[in-house]
Image (tube, rainbow, N blue to C red):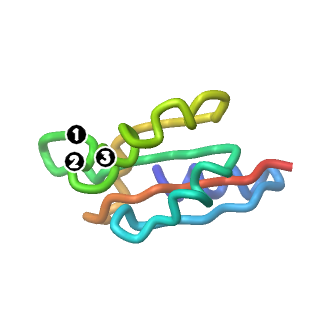
Amino acid sequence: MAKAIEEGIVEAGGAVTVYKSNAMDKDAILSSDVIVMGSSATGAEVIDENDLLPFMEEAGDKFKGKKYISSVLTDGEVENMLITGKLN
């Protein structure tokens, strides 16, 4: 799913950056037009409570006006990740 989202943003003429949740640039993420957050499906299907959830709570209102998706991304990856995009 993550790869399909990345490809869709690029096909629409946008630029994509992929971050691992434990190595994210919070300012760059919040300056993006599109923010996609996800954790791999491990049976619990919950958002990562170590990195992603605290970031979401801390950023709060900064998500207003953004195209935002919080989803389970199942690419065979076990790492939690974020995809950001700048749209043209």
Q: Amino acid at mark 3?
A: Pro
**Element on which disc 2 rests:** loop
Residue 32 appears at what percent x and percent y?
Answer: 67, 50
Q: Position of residue 85 (x, y in %)?
A: 67, 53
Q: For this view, does 26 lie left or right of residue 44?
A: right
Give the amino acid type for the residue marked by disc 2 in the picture: Glu
Residue 2 spot, x, y in % from top left: 48, 54
Of marks 3 and 2, which one's residue comes earlier in the chain?
A: 2
Q: CA distance from mark 1 to mark 3?
A: 13 Å
In the displayed structure, 82 sits above or below 33; it is below
Please report whichever mark, 1 or 3, sits nearer to the chain's N-terminal start.
1
Residue 83's disc number: none
| Residue at the disc numbered 1 | 46
Between marks 3 and 2 in the image, the one whose residue lies nearer the viewer: 3
Question: What amino acid type is highlighted by mark number 1?
Answer: Val
Q: Residue at x 30, y 65 (%)?
A: 79
Nearest to the observer: residue 39 or residue 28: 28
Q: Is residue 61 above or below residue 83?
A: above
Q: Position of residue 52 (x, y in %)?
A: 34, 50
Which-is-in-front pick, marks 1 and 2? 2
The residue at the point 47 percent across, 41 percent down is 59
Q: Are marks 3 and 2 in contact (CB under 8 Å)?
A: yes
Q: Which residue is mark 2?
A: 49
Q: Label 3: which residue?
A: 54
CB under 8 Å between callouts 1 and 2?
yes
